[in-house]
């Protein structure tokens, strides 16, 4: 026993410092481990949040595309019909055709120059009608394909 007391007296300070260092190291390790676990939990939460945001974005994009497709299917035929009616109203060929048909039935009602003038106006209106119709169709196709 005497040797243990002598050993304790001689090395007491060294033992306290060693135990103190070991305890401090253990405490630092535990603090670091708790901090690392909190960081891992936060990273998992962020990953879950990112995944849910990406899922919501994908769902919103799919919903938007679905609504856009429905809108195109419903709106485009209506727009095409209203545009063709508008072109037909603006480029009314019926009056010119009636005058030409009247001139055909009654040979002396229209002079040759009036007939030529009516035919020229009719050709110009028909060409404008064709170009307006093609432009409307191309515009509608561009609208569909740009979606």
Image (spheres, rainbow, N blue to C red):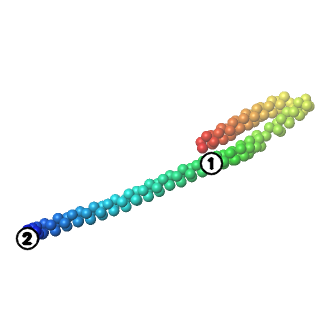
Query: Mark 1 — residue?
Result: 66
Tell me where residue 62 appears, x and y as whole percent. 58, 49
Question: Dot 1, how many residues are within 10 Å of its Cα: few (below 14), some (14-19), or many (20+)?
Answer: few
Q: Is 25 displayed left or right of 113 in the figure? A: left
Quadrant containing the C terminus is top right
Most foreground residue, 33 or 4: 4
Query: Mark 2 — residue?
Result: 2
Residue shown at the point (89%, 34%) measured from the top left = 102
Residue shown at the point (76%, 32%) measured from the top left = 123
Q: Is residue 34 visible?
A: yes
Tell me where residue 116 appears, x and y as whole percent. 80, 30
Q: Is 91 displayed left or right of 100 in the figure? A: left
Tell me where residue 9 appears, x and y as whole percent. 9, 71
Most foreground residue, 74 or 84: 74
SS at mark 2?
Answer: helix
Image height of 15 relative to 57, above or below: below
Residue 35 position by quadrant? bottom left
Q: Nearer the viewer, mark 2 or mark 1?
A: 2
Instruction: Please count the marks in the image.
Output: 2
Image height of 4 relative to 45, above or below: below
Residue shown at the point (40%, 59%) measured from the top left = 41
């Amino acid at each position: 026993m005497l040797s243990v007391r002598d050993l304790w007296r001689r090395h007491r300070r060294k033992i306290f410092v060693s135990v103190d260092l070991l305890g401090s190291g253990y405490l630092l390790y535990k603090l670091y481990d708790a901090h690392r676990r909190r960081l891992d939990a936060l990273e998992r939460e962020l990953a879950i949040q990112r995944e849910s945001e990406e899922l919501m974005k994908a769902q919103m994009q799919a919903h938007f595309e679905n609504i856009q497709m429905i809108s195109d299917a419903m709106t485009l035929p209506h727009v095409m019909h209203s545009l063709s009616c508008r072109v037909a109203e603006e480029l009314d060929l019926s009056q010119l055709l009636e005058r030409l048909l009247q001139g055909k039935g009654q040979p002396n009602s229209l002079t040759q120059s009036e007939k030529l003038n009516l035919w020229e106006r009719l050709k110009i209106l028909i060409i404008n009608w064709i170009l307006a119709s093609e432009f409307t169709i191309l515009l509608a196709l561009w609208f569909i394909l740009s979606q």
